[in-house]
Image (cartoon, rainbow, N blue to C red):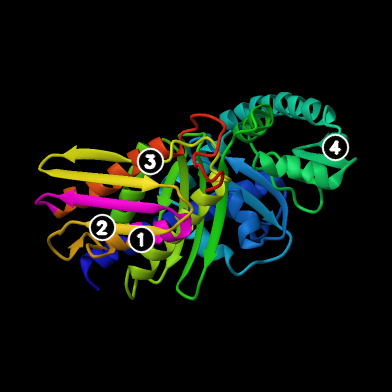
Amino acid sequence: MNSDLLSFERVGLARRSRLEMLRQRYAAQAGCAPSGVVFLPSPEAVDLIGIDAADIEQLGPIEAPITAVRVASPNPDVARWEALLSDGLVDAGLTAILPVSIASKKKQNSEIEDKIKVVLRTFEAWNEIESARADGDRISLAWADEAGAKARLAAIGLDLPESGQFRVLSVEDARALADRLAAPTVRAASVRRTTKETDILVSLNLEQSAPVRISTGVEYYDHMLEQIAKHGGFALEVACEGDIGIDAHHTIEDVALAFGDALAKALGDRRGIGRFGFELPMDETRAGVWIDLSGRPFSKFDGDIPGERVGEFPVEMTSHVFRSIADSLKAAIHVSVEGENAHHMIEACFKAFGRALRQVVKVEGDAIPSTKGVL
């Protein structure tokens, strides 16, 4: 076994050891068996994976949470998703269950209760809702007009399960829910894409700049997607398990498709958006990206990027990423790049794309930006 592989396995073992330590400590604190506790990168993964969860708790700081789930029954997907947890998330969980962190958690719970009261008052003012009540971290709603209430909730990006319950997991969740009800312009979406080659979860929020957490298994691609989110000014979380042992193609393509799909869902009817493009210099490189959120997919890429790979990222996949996004986003995306260094050229494309996105998704009014009246 070569030294690089041995080093990698030792790192993996160290992380797994800390994860098991976290599982033991959390189970002791919660009064349950360690075998009944799993950890996930985000609360959204619970529903998207299809876990039968008895209890959910978000540990760690808002900017780096890890989600503890007490499961009612085993799920074979859990081990694969636990493998996506970074060292930082595991360490954040261990820190969160120290005594000083527990005291801080009590303070957070008080803040959550305050925000839940705001949410309840808002719901009680809706004619479509007969009553709203809080039970721990759950908010349960009884309908006066179920169809009308769900339509009103969907219009601000809230889709309720059949049980008619929200679950609030953190101060940030409570604040986000209260803010979303107060300002019904929040544009956010989560998409899970599962194929024979990949299993992908993408969540984004165009009204927030954080968190940005990317794990595709292709480090350079992670860096490029972080550039899109950073320069686009929005929150983005991507977790992917793909067949990168064979080739990075499926992972890169499917993540791009899921990202475009999530972005399309978050934009809704695209009312009031800026709609169009951006150019960006980077050392010897210059890249331009022009986007039209027209509802019609089209992609054009101009530029010859030297070499075959940057890290594990195939150079030829650069144009393919933007074509995949264009297809699922239903947008016209034109990319042009010139330069000498492949790393710079690819990075400039992704940065310019992020900056172009920042412009085109910005809400500038309340009208559909088309003489047709629809995009």
Q: Nearer the viewer, mark 4 or mark 2?
A: 2
Q: What residue is disc 1 on?
A: 323
Determine the CA span between mark 1 and mark 4.
Answer: 42 Å
Q: Residues within 10 Å of mark 2 (few under 14, many from 20)?
A: some
Determine the CA span between mark 3 and mark 2.
Answer: 17 Å
What percent of the width, then of the height, locates residue 156? 66, 38
Q: Which mark is residue 301?
A: 2
What percent of the width, then of the height, locates residue 31? 72, 48
Q: Residue at x 82, y 31 (%)?
A: 126
Look at the picture and state if 235 lies above or below 99: below
Q: What residue is disc 3 on?
A: 276
What percent of the width, then of the height, locates residue 332? 38, 53
Determine the CA span between mark 4 and mark 3.
Answer: 38 Å
Helix, strand or loop status at disc 2: strand
Q: What residue is disc 4 on?
A: 128
Query: Looking at the image, can residue 246 be seen?
Result: yes
Q: Is residue 258 left or right of residue 70?
A: left
Kindly identify the amino acid type of the residue bearing the numbered disc 3.
Phe
- First along the sequence among labels 1 and 3: 3
Query: CB atoms at circles 4 and 2 under 8 Å apart?
Result: no
- Magenta residues, start to end: 321-341
Helix, strand or loop status at disc 3: loop
Query: Looking at the image, can residue 84 be seen?
Result: no
Helix, strand or loop status at disc 4: loop
Q: Look at the image and say whether residue 194 sits in the magenta stretch.
A: no
